[in-house]
Image: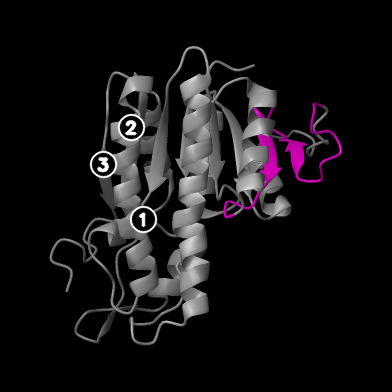
Amino acid sequence: MTARAAIVTGAGTGIGRAIARALLADGWGVTLAGRTRTSLVEAATVDTGIAPPRPHPGPHAGHPGVHHGGHHNALVVVADVTDAASVDALLAAHVARFGRLDLLVNNAGSFGPTADVGELDPSDWQAVLAVNVTGAVLCAGAAFRQMRSQEPAGGRIVNNASISAESPRPRSVAYTTTKHAITGLSKSIELDGRPHAITCTQVDIGNVRTGLLDGVVGDGALQADGSRRVEPTMEAGPLAALVVHVANLPLGVSVPRLTVTAAGMPFVGRG
C-alpha cells in the first residue's frame, strides 16, 4: 500500500493522462480509469521502461478491465462512469490495491454537439448529461462514501468543470449546461464533506491542448460575433502540476475553485 492514493477518471488521454502521470511521478498510487484499455495502459507505462501490465491478482482476478499498471504504483481499470455498478467496481478494485482513497480527480467528460438549444437533439443531450453530470455524481458519491468510512477519514475531490462553467462558447448549450451543474456538485461536496474532512476543488480550465480542444477550436474557434479566431492554448503539464500541488495540501486547507487558462485566450471579456 502507498501513503497516498488517487483515482483519475478519463485518464487515458489529454488532461486526465497528464494529471495521472504527474501524480505517479510525485509518488502517489494511482488508479487510471477510462473506457479504453489500450490508452490507459499506455498512460500507465509510457517512459517507465517497465513491462506492460499483467492481470490484477487480487479479488478481481480474471476481470478483463483490471490490470496492474506498468508503473509500480499504477492500476488500470476499464470503467463506465455512467454506470453505478461499474463505478462501484472501480472503487472496489482501487481499495483492494491501495487500501484507501485520498483523491478523486473527476475528469471524464464529453463536449457533445455543436448546437444552440433550439437545435439540440434530445438523444445528444442525454449522452452529454450522462457523462458530464451523472458520471461525475456517481464517481463523487462512491469516493465520498469511501473517504467518509476509511481510517483516518477524509480526502479531496477535484472536479474538472471547464471555464464553460462560468462563460459559454457559442452553440455549446449541452456542454455549458452540464458544466454549470458541476459548480453545484462541487459546492455541495464541499459543504456536506465538512464533518468528514472531505474537501472539493473545482478547476475551471481553458484551452489546454488536447484532442477534445482540437474539435472545438480547430483552425479557429467560433466567437460570439460569428467570426472565427485562432486562440492561445497551453500544454497540460502546468495544469497537472497545479492539481498535484492542491492534492498535497493538508485537508485543513480548502481550495474551493481555481481558474487556469492559456494566457490571452478570450475568457475575461469573452463575447
Q: Position of residue 22 (x, y in %)?
A: 50, 35
Q: Which residue is mark 1?
A: 234
Quarter of the image holding residue 114? Answer: bottom left
Nearer the observer: mark 3 or 2; the answer is: 2
Nearer the observer: mark 1 or 2; the answer is: 2
Q: Which residue is mark 2?
A: 192
Q: Tag 3, which secondary structure?
A: strand
Q: Tag 1, which secondary structure?
A: loop
Q: Which residue is mark 3?
A: 257
Which amino acid, mark 3? Answer: Arg
Mark 2 burial class by Cα count in 10 Å: few <14, some 14-19, many 20+: few
The answer to whether residue 74 is visible is yes
Instruction: Choose the circle earlier in sequence order: 1 or 2.
Output: 2
Instruction: Choose the circle earlier in sequence order: 3 or 1.
Output: 1
The answer to whether residue 162 is visible is no
Q: CA distance from mark 1 to mark 2?
A: 34 Å
Q: Residue at x 41, y 73 (%)?
A: 216
Residue span colored magenta: 58-82
Which quadrant, please, contains the N terminus? top right
Which amino acid, mark 2? Answer: Asp
Quarter of the image holding residue 243? Answer: top left
Q: Is residue 79 magenta?
A: yes
Q: Tag 2, which secondary structure?
A: helix
Q: Residue at x 34, y 61 (%)?
A: 233
Q: Position of residue 249 (x, y in %)?
A: 34, 22
